[in-house]
Image: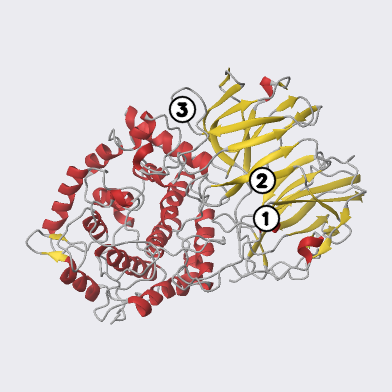
Amino acid sequence: MKKEPEVFKGRWITTAQFSDLAPQNVFHRQLDRSSLPVIEPELQNRHILFRKKFKLKEFSSAVIHISADDYYKLYVNGAFVTQGPAAGYSFHYFYNRIDLSRFLQPGENTIAVHTYYQGLINRVWVSGDRQHGLLLDLMVDGETVLASDESFRCRVHSGFSGVGTVGYETQFMERYDAASPEVGFERPEFDDSSWEFAKTRKHADYQLYLQPSQQLEFEEITPVEVKNTQGGYLVDFGGMFVGNLTFRAAGKRGDEIEMRFAQELNEDGSARYELRANCRYVEYFKLSGGKDTLNQFDYKSFRYVELLPPPGCEIELDSFRLVARHYPFSLRAVCNRSDEKSLAVWKLCVDSLHYGVQEVIQDCMEREKGYYLGDGCYSLLAYCLLTRDYTLMEKFFDDFLRTSFVNRGLMTCAACSFMQEIAEYPFIMLTLLQEYCCLTGNREYVRERYAAFADILDFYREEYADADGLLNHLDKWCVVEWPANVRDGYDVDLTEGRPCDTRHNVINAYYIGAIKSLNRVAEWIGEKPYADPAPLEAAFVKAFYDPEKQLFRDSDVSTHISLPGNVFAAFYELFPDRAGVEKTIAMIREKRLSQSLFFETFPLLAFLTREGEEELVHELLTDENAWLRIISEGGTRTFEGWYKDLKWNTSLFHLTLTLGALFLTDWDIRGILRFSGRGAAPARALA
């Protein structure tokens, strides 16, 4: 049943700079360059603070409903409470419901909120749209006692300034000035009498819904080593984490400590702050002349930090902490292998999910921080199977179905202002839906969304199907596998940014597989099958099958035979005879995982498991050139590749390869990932 949006008594409040601004549309098809959003540097990287004092009588319970655009950090009576919300679109924006009972007291109280408007066009938030604000209602014993309005004080935090962006315009590096007059704004005794009063947003067209997922958790990580260097100190936290650095220091007012964050060390033992992942991780801590504590707002992914303090600066060496942030993680699965290599791979994947999942399943933790539809399906499945918690998966489906307002065939990244369309991603999601159905038994959830899932396939058929039903001339990017050097020479021009005019194998294998998945879902919830895949399977064999070699070609104009051109066909059960299945297994034995990474590895291992090739699966999982290669290169979290130099911009903390854990724990892969069954009800024809 569709939920009604929450009605707040509070108003969206902001500063005078933002109050009158009309929202800017940042949404468009990827190849539509006719009306791109205007980049407005004067609005970017705005740290805006709010404060409000109020009094309470004796009470039993207190709950706050709070949201902000783009983001907030909430403090009550000087104590940090939480942060959020998960990113969303204004027509379905999230708020958080937080129990404040233990933070409030009878008498005077202070609420302080640090909000942030980034203003960049990227994969992190729906930003660059001129929409900033804070919204809250505080309920005490069921009565609203405080609501955001123009009696709140507000001010731009002058202590945060940018020192350039990193990644794909993903975030600003920060210079924190401990002498700024806003330092300590969260404390009750702070004097805000010189601050301006907040302004109500004149254009605040939001529909607010309770965020269905949990709040982030925070862990303080202490260093395993603090080492003197020629110019300062090198701090090692013992593993890769996502979060912020904090420590205490004292020195001359205006002096700066340079901080170089790194995921690995250079050969000379210094911090490699020029990350492989296209990020220059250098930030600054400007001192006040007293004893200062570093405060950072946005997060980074790092293990090491090298500090270069100015002369006369004193750093409290026992004060270093990495405040790691992650989504709650409670392991409820076990490894089904006991050998040392399998256990090492298992631990790598589990630790990566534990410390890598944020408000959403994202890909890399630094260059993009992207909420990706395709590779997210695999890391999300791993997280859910390991924790037995499917909340994030349900939110994932809903978040990406909402991208249909931009394009019925969905967008690559959800809840952001970066517009990209990758053709096969929605098809991967439909197979994830099949897995969700079998693993959760939640028929009601699926029934309510079935028409939306079916519309995705309707769109692809209406826009791209040839007379025989196969897809062609797609204006969405077909990736097949990424990067291009692990496609096994797949003989199709897959250049991003222009339509693909070659009718090719993999996108059609995905399409037929998605139809089969939706048919199984339909049968499970008591609906007629979506469509009969048999005519498409026949067209696929006619277009791509080489009867002499008994394998599939890459396209209908190529004779080249590749691993992806056959793995996806084998996974979705498209071979016309058993010989091709056996030859695909032989290809895998020969090429191992050298021509497989983000998108092919899960289907490859699942296909082998379904075929009873458990020992080959074990060989691949423990191959010295796969997950164990990551560990041998010093990885404590999964990389964006089997080794550091596989890509030109490799992230050393990327979640997709946590899919390895799926094949080291017990679940019914053979029963769930079957695509050849037919429902009893007649299916409609696609032609």
Q: Earlier in the sequence, mark 2 or mark 3?
A: 2
Whether tag 1 and tag 2 are in contact, CB under 8 A, the answer is yes
Residue 645 sits in which quadrant? top left
**Residue at horizontal 53 percent and vertical 64 percent from the top:** 398
Instruction: Please provide percent x and percent y for residue 665.
Output: 37, 42
Residue position for label 2: 162
Position above or below: 221 against 9: above
**Between 578 and 166, the one nearer to me in the picture:** 166
Instruction: Assign a secondary structure to mark 1.
Output: loop
**x%, y% of residue 283?**
63, 37
Q: Amino acid at mark 1?
A: Gln
Question: Which picture quadrant has residue 130?
Answer: bottom right
- Say which residue label 3 marks: 266
The percent position of residue 539, horizontal first and vertical second, equals 20, 73
SS at badge 2: strand
Separation of residues labelled 2 and 3 (CA atoms): 26 Å
The type of residue carrying mark 2 is: Gly
Seen as rendered, the residue at the extreme left is 548
| Residue at image mark 1 | 44
Question: Disc 3, disc 1: CB below 8 Å?
Answer: no
